[in-house]
Image: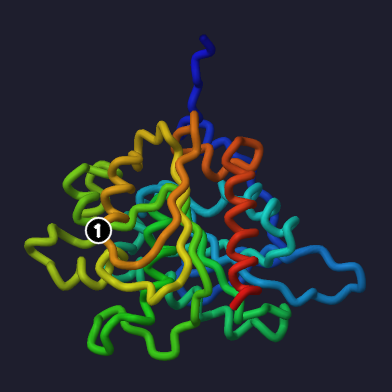
Amino acid sequence: MTRLILKTVDDYIKLKSVKSDVRLHYGDHTEQFGDLYLPENTDGRYKSSPVIVLLHGGCWRAAHSLLQLGELCQSLTDLGYTVWNLEYRRLGNGGGWPTTFTDVAKGTDFLKTIAEQYTLDLTKIITMGHSAGGHLALWLAARSNLSIDSELYTPNALNISAVVSLAGIPDLERGVEQNICRGACEELMGGLAADYPERYKQGSPHHISLGGIPQIHLVGELDPIVPVDYLQTSLEQQQDPYTLQIIPDIGHFEMVMPDTVSWPYIKRSLEILNEKSIEQ
């Protein structure tokens, strides 16, 4: 019997960065920037393309950045997408409540500013995130349904077409209970739900309806960081429809490595979302 060897955080850290076409700042803080990866064109002009807003994981902590997602960005652009690999302030460099949320919101809305220059199709925006980034990808899709008096409300927020969550964390309360990311769920929110119930209602995606936006969740069968039972239970508690696929024989970090079995699942998820958008 072959013994499975799962990818580790050390394997993740060693992932090669891939130079983007351009790095753009959406704010004055050093962490308020994104790397834009553009699909190839043959005539020297940017080709109109749908956009994937990509959000890295790392338990919302400053120890990890967007650099490890370079190979995934390249693979996504090879499919014809523009990828906005978004950086944001994290725990340890100015992030937490509400800054991490407001950064990803501001960074996503920044696409309006550059859409004409880079020929972005803002009618087709998919948020995709890994782990803690999956939480943020889901929240970005739901934020237009926040109440106007919410601390995180943004008028005229950019509409999201769909979400692909890669071992994401949709339920922060359950994340605290199960010690997902070793206390980072609580740190992100500045305390427990009992102390800050409104924060959790505004920042935990399972509390906010996505309003029918398609959401696809992928998770490794052997994921030790975002376990399958956590994700299944969290999704069952929400009212919105979703698709959950459990990828056999992988853990957590394979999810963002295009040379692993996760890639065909990601590719097929995007194909399904494209088919749905055509039907609509």
Q: Which residue is at the far left?
A: 194
**Where, by quadrant of the figure, is residue 205 drawn?**
bottom left
Mark 1: amino acid: Gln
> Where residue 116 sits: x, y (%)?
70, 86
> Where residue 226 sits: x, y (%)?
35, 42
Q: Is residue 27 left or right of residue 190?
A: right
Above or below residue 176? Residue 252 is: above
Above or below residue 255? Residue 65 is: below
> Closer to the camera, 232 or 139?
232
Please name the residue shown 7% across and 61% down the image: 194
> Where residue 224 sits: x, y (%)?
35, 34
> Where residue 249 sits: x, y (%)?
49, 29
Q: Which residue is at the far right?
A: 43
| Quadrant in which the C terminus is drawn | bottom right
Q: Is residue 53 left or right of residue 115?
A: left
- Number of residues whose C-alpha sits closer than 10 Å to that of mark 1, classed few (under 14), some (14–19) or many (20 or more): few
> Closer to the camera, 236 or 222?
236
Please name the residue shown 21% across and 51% down the image: 174
Above or below residue 79? Residue 105 is: below
Please name the residue shown 68% across and 50% down the image: 18
**Where, by quadrant of the figure, is residue 60 drawn?**
bottom left
What coloring was used for the rendering? rainbow
Above or below residue 262? Residue 205 is: below
> Closer to the camera, 150 or 242?
242
**Where, by quadrant of the figure, is residue 124 drawn?**
bottom right
Please name the residue shown 43% across and 51% down the image: 244
Q: Which residue has dot 1 on it?
A: 237
User: Is disc 1 placed on a helix, strand or loop?
Assistant: loop
Q: How many marks?
A: 1
Q: Which residue is at the far top?
A: 1
